[in-house]
Amino acid sequence: MRFLGNTEAKTDPKGRVFLPAVYRKQLQAAGEEVLVLRTDVHGKCLVLYPESAWVKRLDDISAKVSEWDEDEQMVLREYMSKAEMLTLDSNGRFLIPKHLLAEAGIAQAVRFIGMNDRIEIWALEKTEKPFMPQADFAAKLKAIMSKTQEIG
């Protein structure tokens, strides 16, 4: 499942928001009913994962975290404690907990951005300008695409 594009929406006074239809249709086609919402590791937005993508991410992290390393366990604990499992209601809405809205600086207007296996939810005003200047974007993309693939 690959999400892309962006859509504007608004939360209601309770913090509920409609998941854009394009993403709902993808989730339904894949049989995904459970979603996981957490703050982005950089704290600038919220990230919505289909359950299968969340489980894969947790498997990847857990495989690298030692049960016997207290610092690594604290990182895993922090990562998991910021997550909320949710489902869409019959209208295609979900509730964003108030503490997550506050952490992401979201008041009411949001922008959903498809980011491969996940969907980011940004405060609309944070997305009104490009994330980086076009010249920087082109240079950084060229550098990324020029990297040689590590064979492991």
Image (spheres, helix red, strand yellow):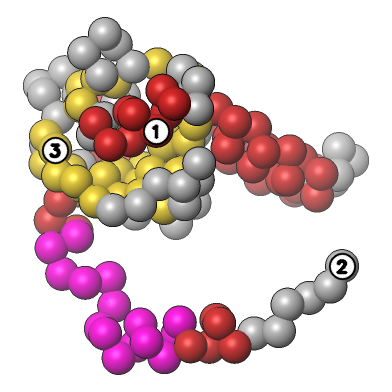
* Residue type, numbered disc 2: Gly
Q: CA distance from mark 1 to mark 2?
A: 32 Å
Residue 26 marker: 1
Q: CA distance from mark 1 to mark 3?
A: 18 Å
| Circle 3 residues within 10 Å: few <14, some 14–19, many ≥20 | some
Give the mark toward the camera: 1 or 2: 1
Q: Give the magenta-colored segment's residue range.
A: 127-141
Q: Main secondary structure of the magenta part?
A: helix
Residue 138 lies in the magenta-colored region: yes
- Count of numbered marks: 3
Q: On the picture, is 107 further left or further right than 132? A: left
* Residue type, numbered disc 3: Ala
| Circle 2 residues within 10 Å: few <14, some 14–19, many ≥20 | few
* Residue type, numbered disc 1: Gln
Residue 106 x %, y %: 20, 42
Asked whether residue 45 appears in the rendered view, the answer is no
Q: Secondary structure at mark 2?
A: loop
Residue closest to the eye, 56 or 122: 56
Nearer the N terminus, badge 1 or badge 2? 1
* Residue occupied by mark 3: 9
Q: Is residue 21 above or below residue 42?
A: above
- Residue found 24% across the figure and 20% down from its top: 93
Residue 79 x %, y %: 58, 40
Q: Secondary structure at mark 3?
A: strand
Residue 12 x %, y %: 11, 24
- Residue found 39% across the figure and 33% down from its top: 26
Q: Is residue 3 above or below residue 37?
A: below
Q: The C terminus lies in which quarter of the figure?
A: bottom right
Residue 116 lies in the magenta-colored region: no
Q: Secondary structure at mark 1?
A: helix
Residue 152 marker: 2
Asked whether residue 81 appears in the rendered view, the answer is yes
